[in-house]
Image (cartoon, helix red, strand yellow):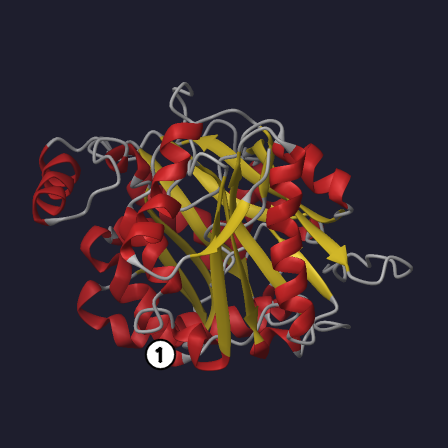
Amino acid sequence: MDYSLIEVKNKTTQKEFLHLPVNLYKNDPLWIRPLDNDIEKIFDPKQNKLFRNGEAIRWILQNEKGDTVGRVAAFIDYSAIKTNPQPTGGMGFFECINCEKAAYALFDACHQWLKAKGMEAMDGPINFGTRENWWGLLVEGQFEPNYCTVYSLPYYPNFFLGYGFKVYFHQYTYHMPVSAENVDPIVWEKAKRIAQNPEYRVENISIKNLKKYAEDFITIFNKAWGRFTGVPKLSKAHAMSLLKSIKPILDKRLMVFAYHLDEPIGMLIMVPDLNQVVKHLNGNLNLWGKIRLLYLLKVKKVCTRALGLIYGVVPQYQAKGVEGALIEGFAKCALSRDYPYTDIDLNWVGDFNPTMRKMLEQIGAKVRKIHVTYRYMFDPTKEVIPPRRVS
């Protein structure tokens, strides 16, 4: 079978790119079709600010009959390149029939495009955006995907490894019921210690003052995550964009900030897991889709699962009890009778961050899913060096 690679440039190829997974996963009851808008905004320069200092391309793959059998995208974030030992591009949104030739044709397209742009390696599957969305290949844990996360067919890892990708790092998604029973008592002891010190305080976010919390978010994020390989500094515009994007579903009970002498030092950011609503929308967020979304979310209240996006403390305040204070601040709402969420999935933590993993285990969270970010070196004599371990 011969295949043709076609760049996505018009509405017809765009539709094929979006619809391919519907055919591939039609017999999988766990798969949830993402919203078309959530995919398309990644590739829209008007909505994705990374185009200001980056570029992206995507393709579909068709067989001799004109059937679409694969898709993929490649992209470069030039600001992130500065933090890598070698110029590294990205590939993602990979979907393909169970055919090695077809999969390799898609990988080749990304490889050649990135190499022509001066890249020396490519990571994948990743997102042309922040790491909380569409990052890594699912290799373990067959559960419903969380909102804007990758769900993969079981034969995909063999394609990546067979082509020559190497494991760059593992990503662990933790799960926990909303209950105080499984929390290590030491967490509450730490929280009590912080509560007795008037220099510290913990508070829930105020929806009326998003600008202030966006600035606090930036401060914490850049201090806590700026040490990670491949993570660029977060700008004020990006933080505001993130908070505005989740404002319609924002639940202040799910967002907690910690301060020391009014300096932001830690945060726990969660949102309702919208995939419990999205699975009823068949990818459409038109006017009727928006009405239905709000009805299911606000009236029917189908979201019983919260999704933890970011949980962290700036380095100099770690192991001082701030983590426990954040958990206690969340628990004050979570353990009340009218709390709608019964479960929490905490967005992935890399294997290079043992401190965070230990912290999650102390609050009773357990690994539920494992994703892998792979790296492919264009020079096969060069080794893949894992991200620097952060303690």
Quadrant of the rendering where the C terminus is positioned: bottom right
377 relative to 47, above or below: above
The one of 350 and 315 positioned closer to us in this rendering? 350
Depth check: give the residue in front, 50 or 218: 50
Quadrant in the picture for residue 48: bottom left
Q: Tell which of 228 and 63 is nearer to you.
A: 63
Label 1: state its secondary structure.
Answer: helix
Question: Which amino acid does the dot numbered 1 rest on?
Answer: Ala
Tell me if residue 179 can be seen.
no
* Residue at x 27% of width, y 76% of height: 211
| Residue drawn at (24%, 54%) of the image | 250
Could you say where residue 220 lies in the image, as x and y percent from the top left?
A: 49, 70
Q: Quadrant of residue 296?
A: top left
The residue identified by callout 1 is 237
Q: Is residue 358 left or right of residue 382?
A: left
Horizontal placement of 345 versus 211: left or right?
right
